Every structure is written in C-alpha cells, then in structure tokens.
Amino acid sequence: MKRIVAFLLIALAVSALGAGTALADGGVSIKSSGAEPQFPSAITFTLEAEADSDIVDVDLEYRVLRRSLVPESCRVDVDFTDGETVTATWRWDMLETGGLPPGTEVEYRWRIEDAGNNVVETPPDTVRFDDLRYDWDHISNDEVNFFWYAGGAAFIQDLAGAADEALNDLSSGIGVSLEQPANFYIYASTWDLHGALVYPDEWTGGVAFPGYSTIVIGIAPGNVEWGKRTIAHELGHLVVHQYVFGPYGVLPTWLDEGLAMDAEGELRADLQQMLDHAIARDSLFSISSIASSFPTDPDEAKLSYAESYSVVRFLIDSYGGDKIVELLQVFRDGSTDDEALLQVYGFDTDGLGERWRVSLGLSPEFPERPGGGGLWIPLPYIVLVALVVVLGLMIVYLGFLYLQRMRSRFN
C-alpha cells in the first residue's frame, strides 16, 4: 500500500515545465509548454514561445491514450496575438465533449510557425488526468489495480477479493477473461462518484470505461456487500467489451447488461420480486424493446435489468456457456442481433423471446402493452396530456368569450 498523490503532483509539475527553453532550427524558441488538468471537466494547455520574426500560427495536437483500432488525434488552431513573443492557451472543455475517467493519459505537442515559414514541433509530452481532490491509496496484482481514499485495509481487501472471484466465475462460467489489467477507482459515496463524472444519471453507482480498462464506483465503507456486487457487475462489462473489441463489436443491451448481472451471482431479491410480479401479470418487456436501450423510468429500468439477467441465464442453462462465447464471437465479427442468434442458436430475437417466455410458464407471444398499437404509455403521461388539452380548450373558450364581449361593447 502506498500514497500516490506526491508522485502525481511531481509528475504534474514536470509536465507543466514541459520542454523548457529550447532553441529550434529557424530561430523559434520554446520557453515553456504545459498542461493543467481540472478534473473532471477540462485540461488547459499553455505555450510560451519566441522567434526572430513574428509567430503567425500555433497548433496543438493531442490524443487520448486508450485502446483503439486506429490512433485518433485532434489538432486545434489556437488563438493568440501575433508577435515575436507569444503566449498561447487552449482549454479542452469536456462538458461539451464528454469526460475522461481518472488516470487517463493525454499525449500532446505543439506546432509553431513564424513569418519566415520556419516550422517547429515540440516533442510529445503527456499529462495524466488524475482526480487530485482525494488522497488515494493503491494496491495491485497482476489483473487489477485498486485506488481508494476511504476505508481501511479490510475494506479494500474485501473488494479485491470480490474482483478475483468475479474474474474466476467469468472464466469458468462462459470462458472469457481480462485482456488488460483493470483499474478501479473507489469513491467513498455516490455523491463523490458523481463529482467525478460529466453529466451522470442520478441512479449511476458505477461506470465501466472499456477502452481505458477503468472502472469507477461509489462504495461507502459501510456498504461493502453492495460494493462487491457492483464490482462484479462492472467487471462483467469490462471483460465482455474487451473480448468483443473490434470495429463491429456492438452488443444488444439485454446481452451486455444480462452478462454483467450474471457476473454478480444470483439476482438481487428486490429485482427477483419485480421480475416475478411482471411474470405473474404477463407484463414483461419484449427482448427487442430492450435491445438498444433501457427505459428512463427507474422501475422500468430495474425490470429491464432483471429481464436481461433472466434471458442470459435461460441461454446459459439451456445451451451452455460455450454458446455464449460463440455468440460474442459472432457479434465481434459484425453480425446483427437476429443474424448472430440464428447462426449460434438457430432462432432470431422473436424466437428467443418465445422460448424464454415458455420457460417462465407463459404463452410464447408477448401481449400488447396498454395504449394501442403495442406502445405502452404510462398513466402519468396520459393524465398530463389530458390536462394540457383541457387547459388549451379552456383558453380558446375564454378567448372566444372575451372577443364576443368586446364586439358587443363596440356595437
């Protein structure tokens, strides 16, 4: 166990100094170059340079160091005032582009051109996007790195043990394992976690960033059991996404979330109760309706998670874990949902839904939800629309009466 904040601050200071003063060919001199993270919302890049003639162009090129099929870089034409000595500043606002997980490294370099068409590029430098608001501790093994700042050794050992168990279950259950070590950042509360994310959903308790092999979770020291399940869940996402990594590896949400729910172990009692209630009422969502995204309503989202777990367990129990791995391989190669299911199991999404429903003791066909046309509109929305219509009619009626009164007055 060790403290890493001092190291991070030193690394940040070295990065801020950049190349220092360096005379380049053509008389362009880089006085300083640096990058300052403002976690989680921005990184500010700064440059000071001078030349024998006016500097007329300054560009910043940067790229995020993460797993990618093709290295992606961005170039920014930075605003500054022309002159022989210039200071250029550019702020990468992540509130507009989406945030980065803690620990991400960003590589950058500057391109400077003077009036004599002399061009110089600085050597690549790196800034680490760390959350320096907290005093992080660190433990690691060959497969996982844990960073945390609240809770003692027993707390983090429990969480690390849950990660090891989840990885073993994923390997033995469906035959997939980590391809890159996982980095866990354990925040002490959901509130702290949300402060590390850009525009999080209010119900977010953990997030996996597969391209960065990073997982962030809010776990209070007194909530270890929930934390252990969440670690297993997010590891399920990470392992599966690493396995299907490629230009086409897009999974239906029910499969992605179902495998993550299965990594937790048995379904939580509250979700099982919700699933049982929906089965009893025959009010399950169709599999195709939870293939792209889950409902925004919290209760409907919970039911979607429970259904996804149930569908994945049906596939594993009925056809074995090897078939799931084969299904993931087919998705990795770029098949659609129906094509992948047909190739591996011999039935499409509707066929899966029919077989799953029969396994639950229901008729094969999904009944239409209330509302006509198969579209289920929750009652509160119906009431709201009705109120708007009634208010609109009242306004029209009152306006008509007002016009009638004005006409009678002038007549």
Image (cartoon, rainbow, N blue to C red):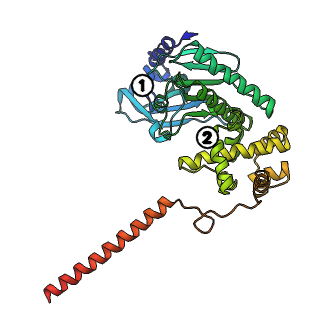
Q: Is residue 248 visible?
A: no
Query: Is the residue 382 above or below the residue 361 in the image?
Result: below
What kind of element bears circle 2?
Answer: helix
Query: Residue shown at 49%/20% (left/top)?
Result: 24
Compared to residue 360, the image places residue 379 above or below, namely: below
Q: Position of residue 351 (x, y in %)?
A: 79, 57
- Judged from this view, the residue extending furthest toward the bottom is 411
Q: Which mark is residue 47?
A: 1
**Position in image of residue 215 (x %, y %):** 60, 29
**Residue 191 in the image, given as x and y percentages of width and height:** 46, 31
Would residue 75 be found to the left or right of residue 242 on screen? left
Q: Residues within 10 Å of mark 1 (few under 14, many from 20)?
A: many
Callout 1 secondary element: strand
* Image quarter of the C terminus: bottom left
Residue 175 is left or right of residue 78, and the answer is right
- Quadrant where the N terminus lies? top right
Characterize the local packing of mark 2: few (<14), some (14-19) or many (20 or more) Cα atoms within 10 angstroms.
Answer: few
The mark lying in front, picked from 2 and 1, is: 2
> Which one is nearer the viewer's eye here, 174 or 337?
174
Q: Give the percent coordinates (x, y) of residue 214.
A: 61, 28
Kindly check if marks 2 and 1 are in contact, taking CB atoms under 8 A apart as contact: no
Q: Picture quarter containing residue 387?
A: bottom left
Residue farthest to the top, as pictured: 2
**Which residue bears the numbered disc 2?**
270
Q: Is residue 215 left or right of residue 83?
A: right
Q: CA distance from mark 2 to mark 1?
A: 55 Å
Q: Residue at x 57, y 31 (%)?
A: 64
Is residue 190 found left or right of 144 in the rendered image? left
Q: Amino acid at mark 2?
A: Asp
Q: Nearer the viewer, residue 25 or 186?
A: 186
> Identity of the amino acid at label 1?
Leu
**Which labelled disc corresponds to residue 201?**
none
